[in-house]
Amino acid sequence: MRRASVAANPVLIGAVTILVTVVAVFLAYNANNGLPFVPTTTIKARVANGANLVQGNEVRSGGTRIGVVSDMRPIRLADGTGGAELTLELGKEHGDVPRDSTLRIRPRSALGLKYVELTKGSSEEDFRSGDVVPSEQASFSAELDDVYRMFDEPTREAAQGNLRGFGDAFASRGSAVGRTLEELPAFFGSLEPVMGTLADPDTDLDGFVRELADAARIVAPVSDQQAALFTSMADTFEALGRDEEALKAFIAKSPSTMDVGVESFRVQRPFLDDLTAFSQDFSGATEELKAALPPLNGAVEVGTPVQKRAVKLNDELAKTLDQVRDLAEAPGTNAALRGLTATVTTLNPQMRFYGPYVTVCNYWNYFWTYLAEHFSEPDSSGQAQRALVNTSPRQEDSIGSMGADEPANGEDVKEGNAAYAQDQPYGAAVAPDGRADCEAGQRGFVERQARFLPEKYKVARDPRSPGLQGPTFTGRPRVPKGQTFTPEPETGPYRDLPESEHP
């Protein structure tokens, strides 16, 4: 007689499936209170304000989750004010908690999620399971709503408008910023000769400004006529610009026309002599103009106040141009122009070298992404930088050793605990041919790369790693087409690369 297979029993298979599902749901449901079967230490903490903390929020230390908030209840503190008592379940694998440790309730997101940050102290005595952290060692961050309540409604609305305006100003303009950085080297290269020409004493910049002031003073009495002239000229040039080909043909024929005009002046001299004699004979007729004087006097009467105001305007303009002249004649002006030229000369090669770090490796965005987290360590006056260095206390001359006479070399520790100094400066961004070589944040820890140090040192000291590291996760495979760059820092005047050297 054959026995029935266990796998052929649907009732047994269904029961096992339901049991596994129930266990999985149980573990998932209780994950916020700490995984089951994990040994924990329970301590309580009193705080003046629960700050919207809820059961199940995480407890973190150094950015790592070490436990959860398993319970909360309202209490009355020693000073008679209301507060909250937190029950914290901490994993024992994360070590004991010194008695001078501090707690702080911090926001985890802008939507109101919170967590408890535990900063371990240095006391030799530790909290035991069931001990209570006094309220003096616990604090909380100000709520964003409380900050906004400091301002009245018009101020809040104005802040919203500012935020919306700044957002609209920079939204979708990342490519424009990148193109600006790409074009800056070429712009500074073109700007350098201009600044050099202006700074040259032979240019006589101060004389040019003085002559401008004289010209403005001379034309001030006819300012209205000049304004009307320029308005009419604008209309004329706008009409001329409608047919570019006709304008080109007119300009092309102008030299020959001027030659013909010069030749015609010789023929016109007899006519001009006769016109002079005629004008003398016509002088008697001017007597008849007296009858036309009343209308002319009315025109002069209307125009006189206008001309008086033009004189005042000219006086103010003369003061302004005098100030400009004084600035041009000041001893420091040429020095400032020379300094600006030197600045452009220095800045241009820097932009050529720094450009690939932004356009290829995207380090600019990476820097701002993690800057807020870097400056989020609380101290007595606000926040400070987070700094954490992993040291190896069992090794001589470790990273944290005081008075170390050699680099961390990993020679005095057991295998698996060795620490080697990693000190490679000047991480590259691109290779000489423009391909991505983003070394910062891309390379791992090597056992040795130090050509000029003895063989006994297993350290990384050479400035560059062999081979190409390639682009970052959001970077580019090579320098954008048309960007002028250098893989090494350089100084000196700007130099355009020949076409044959372009990447």
Image (cartoon, grey):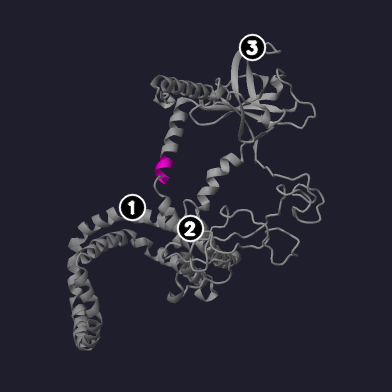
Split into 4 quadrants, where in the image is the C terminus? bottom left
Q: Which residue lies under the disc numbered 1?
A: 305
For the residues bearing labels 1 and 2, Cβ distance under 8 angstroms = no
In the rendered view, would you say 382 is above or below 276?
Answer: above
Quarter of the image containing the N terminus? top left
Tag 3: residue type? Ile
| Secondary structure state at the residue bearing disc 1 | helix
Instruction: Please give the residue where the numbered disc 2 appears in the rendered image.
Output: 360
According to the picture, the residue beneath numbered tag 3 turns out to be 75
Residue at screen point 60% across, 53% down: 444
Q: Report the magenta residues as a range.
A: 165-170
- 167 inside magenta stretch: yes
Magenta residue check for 443: no
Label 2: which secondary element: loop
Report x, y in % for residue 314: 41, 58
Residue 218 visible, this angle: yes
Mark sitting earlier along the chain (3/1): 3
Question: Residue 5, relative to residue 450: is it above or below?
Answer: above
Q: Between label 1 and label 2, give the one nearer the viewer.
A: 2
Locate residue 228, reporting x and y percent.
28, 59
Name the side, left or right, on which 492 lies relative to 321: right
Name the amino acid, label 2. Answer: Val
Tally of numbered discs: 3
